[in-house]
Image: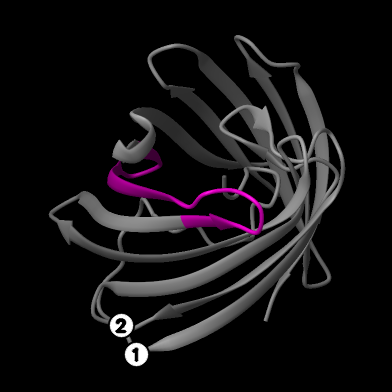
Amino acid sequence: MKKTMLSLAVASAMVMSAGSAAAAEGAANVALVSDYVFRGVTQSDGGASLQGGYDYDMGNGVALGIWGATGVNFGVEEIEYDIYASYSGEAGDMGYSIGFTNYMYTESDAIGEVALGLSFGSVSIGYYSASSIDYTYYELGYDMSAGGMDVNFHYGNDGASADMAVGLSKDMGGYSLGLTATTHDTADSTAALSVSKEF
């Protein structure tokens, strides 16, 4: 599947904090991660992954994007490429979002997933559902800054297992350097590095 806390600068299909209307704009991103971890589980069999994408914010709450990753390995190495769309807004102090992501692979079947998100300041709540594989995932996140670094705390649960992660990132000369430690009920714990850049 898609994206990881390891590549903190790679824009997510579901932005949990909603912004006010602005001019339309696009941004590209690229990242190299030492292990592509998604929801607590390695997607690259513990190996490195080159990732990148392009996001277009239409300025009216609607955002579109495409994202890809190499090194994906579910018994055979393949490339992942995702397309997604979302709508986000605000209601008082609360941010909200709704979106859809289609996860596609060169050697595996595509998976479509609906996502709903709420945010309250630095706290975010997410709900994800992929009906084609009878999968539901809930997550809770908290973001803060400390010592000149961005810090992210994550807890997720799919009903059968849970994962937790702590991510640190720091901007260094236009590049974002990251370190994320992840634990999972049924998978090996990981500590992975990332370097990413937005254009």
Magenta includes 124? Answer: yes
Q: Which residues are magenta?
A: 103-125
Instruction: Kindly identify which residue carries mark 1.
Output: 23
Instruction: Kindly identify which residue carries mark 2.
Output: 59
Which amino acid, mark 1?
Answer: Ala
Residue 46 position, x and y percent, is 84, 33
Of residues 160 and 93, the one drawn nearer to the viewer in this rendering: 160
Magenta includes 71? Answer: no
- All told, the count of numbered labels is 2
Local SS, label 1: loop
Packing grade of label 2 (10 A; few <14, some 14-19, many >=20) is some
Q: CA distance from mark 1 to mark 2?
A: 5 Å
Q: For the point 62% across and 78% down, which residue is it?
A: 28
Q: Is residue 28 above or below residue 129?
A: below
Q: Is residue 173 above or below residue 34?
A: below
Which quarter of the rendering shows the C terminus?
Answer: bottom right
- Which mark is on residue 62? none
Which amino acid, mark 2?
Answer: Gly
Decide: marks 1, 2 in contact (CB < 8 A)?
A: yes
Q: For the point 57% across and 49% down, which residue is it?
A: 2
Residue 68 position, x and y percent, is 64, 63
State left or right for residue 15 relative to residue 7: left
Q: Is residue 91 above or below residue 39?
A: below
Prevailing secondary structure class for the magenta stretch in the rendered image: strand
